[in-house]
Image: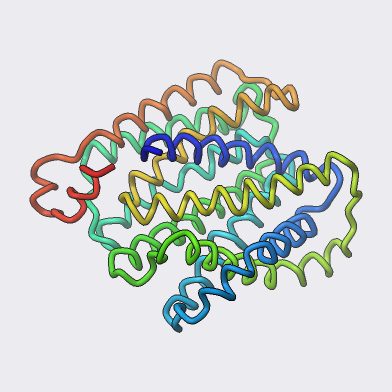
Amino acid sequence: MGFVAVEIIFVLIWAFGFISVELALVDGGPFITLTIRLWIAAALLLPFFVRARHRFDRSRLSDAVIQGLTAQAFWLICIFQSQALGARPGEVALIAALQPLATAALAGWVVREPTEPRHWLGLALGLAGTVLVIAPGAEGSRGMALGHLVAAGAAITMTVAVLHRRRRGEAGESSPQGASDGFAQLAMQFGVAAMVITPIAVFLEGWQATWTPLYAANMVWQVTGQSIASFGLLWWLLDRASAVRVSSLFYFTPPVTMVLGYLAFGDRIGWLDGAGMALALIGLIVVRMPISRRSRARFPRLSSVCEKT
């Protein structure tokens, strides 16, 4: 399967995640739903960790803790809680898609990957598109301001997770030895996140969830698709391409999420929403243009990665 095909699959799964959160919140609280999801995902991947545990030294265990706290625990808490507060799935997806801006701002310093002027232009267009959709009074925007603020926390935590993964990968200390080790890393991340979220769920929600057929079916998808598949693909992409390129994929998810939100919940897509999505997509195209010769000379290792992908 080609690299672009993997990117497309990742975007589709990631976008549907915001819709699955909305469906889950009908019958269960955000924290209890996350607790169940993460413990089941960790249990399913536990055999991979048992077989590969001798290859995981203290450094890789530390990586799993950091990625579990950022990409799993805090990211998921922000996504679920923002929608529980009333923000629409498409709005949450757009706010979370601000993450590429933060990644671009820090990539050169943290992982020595180039962010050129045209990258900033493309990312700024993406930001402008986001503002059009979530601005006060925008047509079709009914998400609560607090939900929007919580969603911004997701962008921050995912930025930390992406840059940490790229930094460790550049140092040759994080990339797994094949799919088996990758699943072992995911098992550790899920376990760390579950241990953080479980006490919150018990204290705030008391394990209350209604196991309707929809909730059960959605939980199967949340475990297999949203936890194992989406994060497995995200780390696979980050081990093979620049942080800015992979992060720019998040700009693809809001349009897909908004269309899914319209089909699933009847969420309106106003003209400002459409204009915002168009700006975000234009920005994505600009960001993903090939890097210049000057940057190739300054970052030869990154250039070779870009040529392969």
Q: Where is residue 242 in the image (x, y as percent from the top left)?
A: 31, 50
Q: In this view, does 158 lie above or below 3?
A: below
Q: Look at 83% across and 44% down and name the residue there.
A: 215
Q: Look at 19% across and 40% down and name the residue there.
A: 291
In the figure, is residue 280 to the left or right of 110? right
Image quarter where the C terminus lies is top left
Q: Where is residue 252 in the image (x, y as percent from the top left)?
A: 47, 33
Q: Look at 67% across and 47% down and name the residue there.
A: 82
Q: Is residue 178 above or below residue 252?
A: below
Image quarter where the N terminus lies is top left
Q: Where is residue 204 in the image (x, y as percent from the top left)?
A: 83, 64
In the figure, is residue 196 to the left or right of 295? right
Name of the residue lying farthest toward the top: 271
Q: Position of residue 142 (x, y in %)?
A: 70, 31
Q: Look at 57% across and 72% down and name the residue there.
A: 49
Location of residue 12 by image quarter: top right
**Camera-side residue: 255 or 88?**
255
**Camera-side residue: 233 or 162?**
233
